[in-house]
Image: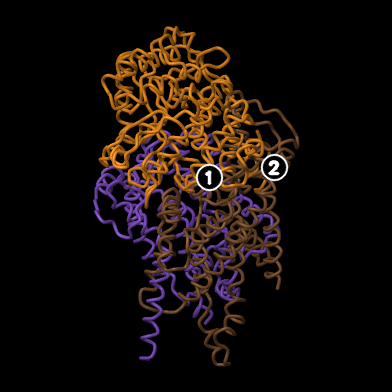
Amino acid sequence: MKKRLATLAALVTLTPLTLAACGDDSPPANATVDSLTLLDYYSDEPTNSLVQALVDKCGTAIGTKINRTAVPGPSLIQKVLQQASSKTLPDVLMLDNPDIQQIAATGALAPLGDYGIKTDGYAEGPVSAATYKGKLYGLQPAANTIGIFYNKDVLTKAGVTPPTTWDELKSTAKKLTTGDQYGFAFNATADFEGAWQFLPPMWTNGGDETKLKDPQVAEALALWKDLVDSGVSSKSVVTWGQGDVNDQFIAGKAAMMLNGPWNIPAIDKAKVNFGVVSFPVNKAGQTSTAPLGGEAWTVPQTGNKAKMSKAAEFVKCMNSDENQMQRAKDGGLVPTKLALADKFKTEVPSMAGFVDAVAHARARTGKLGEKWPDTAKVIYTGMQLVLTGQAAPADAMAKAGA
Amino acid sequence: MSARRPRAAIRTAVALVLLALMLFPVYWMLNISLQPSGNTLSGTFFPTDPTLAGYRTAFQDQGRNLVTSLLVASGTVVVTLLVSTPCAYALAQFRFRWISWALLALLISQMIPGIVIANALYTLYERLGVLNSVPGLIVANAANAIPFGILILRSFMLGVPPSIVEAARVDGAGPIRSLVSVVVPISRNALITVGLFAFLFAWSDFIFALTLTTKGTVVPVTLGIYTYLGAHVDNWSAVMATAVLACIPAVILLVVAQKYIAAGATGGAVK
Amino acid sequence: MTKTTSPASARSTGRRGEEITKILFVVPAAVAIVVLFGYPVVKNLVMSFQDYTLATFFTGEAPWVGLQNFATVVGDALFTKALVNTALFTAGSIAGQFAIGLALALFFHRNFPLNRVVRALFLLPWLMPLIVGSAAWRAVLEQDSGILNVTLERLGIIDSPVPWLASSDVALVSVILVNIWLGIPFNLTLLYSGLQDIPEELYEAAALDGATGWRSFRYITWPNLREVVGIVLMLGVIYTLKVIDIILGLTHGGPANATETIATQSYERSFVEFKFGQGAALSNILIVISLAFAILYLRATRRRIDE
């Protein structure tokens, strides 16, 4: 009885492993394709329906049915890995731009250049994020970044203008810190979000992710530290996500915040009169640089040549001028084609601040490629060490493992 | 007799205060669900401007998901109890030489992180074609709860006096009969408690719901909540409203179940 | 049992039939456990000796590296801190949950109006998805406007707001307190059921002998409750060692790694940094720690059965 049990158990546990080895059949590249599978993380409303509309539109345009699955944001990569190991990757895969190079490095994605996809006229950030070892693996239709939102009414009442330098940021915030209201709010949590929010001061000041121990990075850390120590920012920034920061801003508990355009619908709903400026510079001559946000469409290597080339057509369609504009207007994003972005600026003046920022936005994986996540960890650890007073800006990054 | 009345009333009062302390975060969830902007930052004890918008959204979207969760959770209770009870009885009353090893295996199964199990199950389910199915979720949740059920039931069954079982055997009952007619009624408290926890594990499970569904056809409510939690934007009032709505059927079941955990299940049996 | 054949052979057939029936009691559970837990346990163990990365999922290659993963994770600067945090978190949580759970179980052991309803409602925290629970607690523990600080200040208990989650010194305590809150329903319900199983007659007989209150607890309640206490503590330790959702939801392991435990480190290594081999190594270290407790428990329970 026990021996039989053991055999049965072994069979059941080994079956998935052996079946996984059974191969794939590959119809010729010009076979007709009835349907494509697609995976993305736009599982929340209203984004879900808006993206579905665009997906259906492109499906019709290329003459193929698209079977779309949307999963919650944090679980996308997990799903991708599960599908990779069971050899059931989708035909079209959406990836957040900092993840593209990591996945491309595993050989799971097809170079889009093979399908005649070119990036002429695109902003630099999205292209560098999706390029691994000289080949393009993803095409991003729209992008966002972060900038300084300010409450126009509060600033006018206090008689101050939005800051353009770090000194102005500190002094303006100080004037705006009264009662319940902090002058400035930002996110400094121990995760990739916190690292992302630290990039504007770091990059604007000339700091580089490959040289974290340099003084320019220490100066950026000192800025974050000064803001909290001087009381213009709450100590709770180490616990607030970007959503919490927005809640603070809307509730009138922060006069200015560092955040992105996805918050605009909520801000409008709360009837806050807001304005946006790029992140201030430290010294004259520096350019405000913010990190690139947004997702790209990629074509996984499924072994089915016909489907892969149809998928590439789909990716091209999602990046057409019309669809880029639509996606940007729907999602509070900026088109990645520079000419379109200029046109967008005139059509949606409230996003003007972000259009300029996106044109200069820098990809997180631009220099480090698949090594970015390790560096991001060092960045947010160093930042938190400084904000909790456990390290001085000068040696925090070293302490964090730089 | 009359002296007992005020004492009982005091106990009730204390119980309610303790409950209030315990449920404060749940109350907070209710508070946020009634806030117009779903801002998690209200400093006020009561929603000053209550709105049912979150509830309307939740009701429209999540009704089907609530039913799914109920089906999965109920199924889990049934399967868990059916499988754990005989096994717990065997490990408590029979003299197998390998009991310690069995217990060790059960304990080890509880040490594995849920996400490791879910990932392994994904491959198995994908091959068997049972992804996106309610029975699939029931089996996964039950398998997760069964070791827990066996360990808890066994601990309770160890307290069943052997004399009772002996009495039944003397009367000619075989092992199955002893279990069903004698041990099960005596272990009523334990069975209900395990059933309760099996329900709770399955109801609040997120990791299996996320991993073992791919298409959005079968969506337990813990996964359905993510309709309101985007990669960037969160609609907390809808999230909290969903959580509140999801609590209601479960609470009803819990109150009913607690009724049956009465004292003295063992008492009288020895006689 | 029908006795048509000779008594001796009938008895032996009957006994064999009974032996098979007894084994069948265990078979469904055994199959379920081997099938659903066997593969993950083995895979997790093997993975800790391999260089299992993101690429492995796509290429299937995972070169054998022996004990290197273990060396890397143990040698990591954060390991000692995570280990200490794990010990503190587990000890603090179990002590708090068990003591409060037992006290509440004893409290509810008497009849009073609404006893049933209140006890059922105590399980409400387990009905909330953890993402909701941690969002609610983050709002409550918020330093500036969180209701806990506001209440404590109004009551005059503290002068300035406590940085519950924002300070590296306090964050671990906060996380332990929330975990205690989370664990109370589990302890309360199981211990209460255990108490209810103790026959009334024992108490009545003891009362006749003059043993009430503390003495009846010590000589009647505690000995009869020991099995249930044993399994509650054992499972409590195993489950607490595994906890990640509430910690990650409240603090992401911060501020500055103040709330990192072996479990959160294991999760982060695997699912954030994609170094699955190292993550598996850490989770296996945790399993070894759990095993030590499990062996202690098994020794104790076997001794009790043999008595």
Q: Position of residue C7 (x, y in %)?
A: 65, 67
If the image is split into quadrants, where does the N terminus of chain C sit?
bottom right
Query: Percent x, y for residue A160?
Result: 34, 37
Q: Which mark is residue C77?
A: 2
Figure colour of chain C: brown
* Sequence-first tag of 1 and 2: 2
- Element under disc 1: loop
Is A131 situated left or right of B46 in this image? right
Q: Which chain is purple?
A: B
Residue B20 lies, in percent from the top left, at 39, 67
Which numbered tag is attached to residue B201? none
Let me know if marks 1 and 2 both belong to one chain: yes
Q: Colour of chain A?
A: orange
Vertical position of residue C23 compared to residue A100: above or below: below
Q: Quadrant of the C terminus of chain C?
A: bottom right
Residue type at mark 1 is His
Name the amino acid, label 2. Ala
Q: Nearer the viewer, residue B240 or C79?
A: C79
Q: For mark 1, what is the residue?
A: C252
Crowd rating for badge 2 (residues with CA inside 10 Å; few <14, some 14–19, many 20+): few
